[in-house]
Amino acid sequence: MERREFARVAVELPLSLSGNGMAGGGLISGLSARGCTLVSDELILPGTTLALRIQLPTQSVPLKVDLAEVRWAQGRECGLEFLRLRLEEKKRLRRFLSALQRAQGGGFQQTG
């Protein structure tokens, strides 16, 4: 069984996505420093690469993931791995996850 390197946090965050001739939106239901689970407006196949814009609460500028790859898909739900984020975006994501973990009563920690 595959173990996650980073803890995944349950969230509900809107996002927009684009790539491979498609553009759409969806809702992230699980988020970690290395990827996310999302329910998309469109069917997306494994292996598809996308750019993401994730709307974090209380932040006016979306978090930009320059490149993510769909690792699995089941209907409109899929799991993405973040392949390329700028350093500042990685820091923003980690700060957000840390704050969310603290608010939920736990610390942000690696699990594998």
Image (cartoon, rainbow, N blue to C red):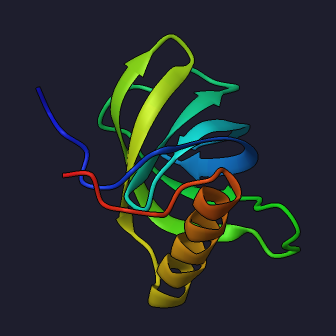
Counting from the top left corner in percent of width and height, residue 1 is at: 11, 26
Q: Is residue 3 above or below residue 82?
A: above
Q: Which residue does the image show at 63% across and 24% down from the upper left? A: 42
Residue lying at the far bottom of the rendered structure: 88
The mark total stands at 0
Residue name at image x 39 percent, y 25 percent: 45
Question: In the rendered view, does 49 fall on the left or right side of 22?
Answer: left
Q: Residue furthest front?
A: 105
User: Could you tell me residue 97's position as x and y percent?
Assistant: 57, 63
Height in image: 55 above or below 87?
A: above
The image shows residue 33 at horizontal and vertical percentages of 43, 62
Q: Is residue 57 above or below residue 30?
A: below
Quadrant in the picture for residue 25? top right
Q: Position of residue 76 (x, y in %)?
A: 57, 17
Please name whichever residue, 72 or 5, is drawn nearer the observer in this view of the structure.
5
**Looking at the image, which is closer to me, 52 or 27?**
27
What residue do we see at 84% from left, 73% from top? 59
Between residues 102 and 36, which one lies in front from this camera angle?
Answer: 102
- Residue found at x 39% / y 50%: 7
In the rendered image, which quarter is residue 54 located in?
bottom right
- Residue that sits furthest to the top in the current view: 75
Task: Determine whether, in the image, residue 70 is placed left or right of residue 62.
Answer: left
Q: Nearer the viewer, residue 27 or 102?
A: 102
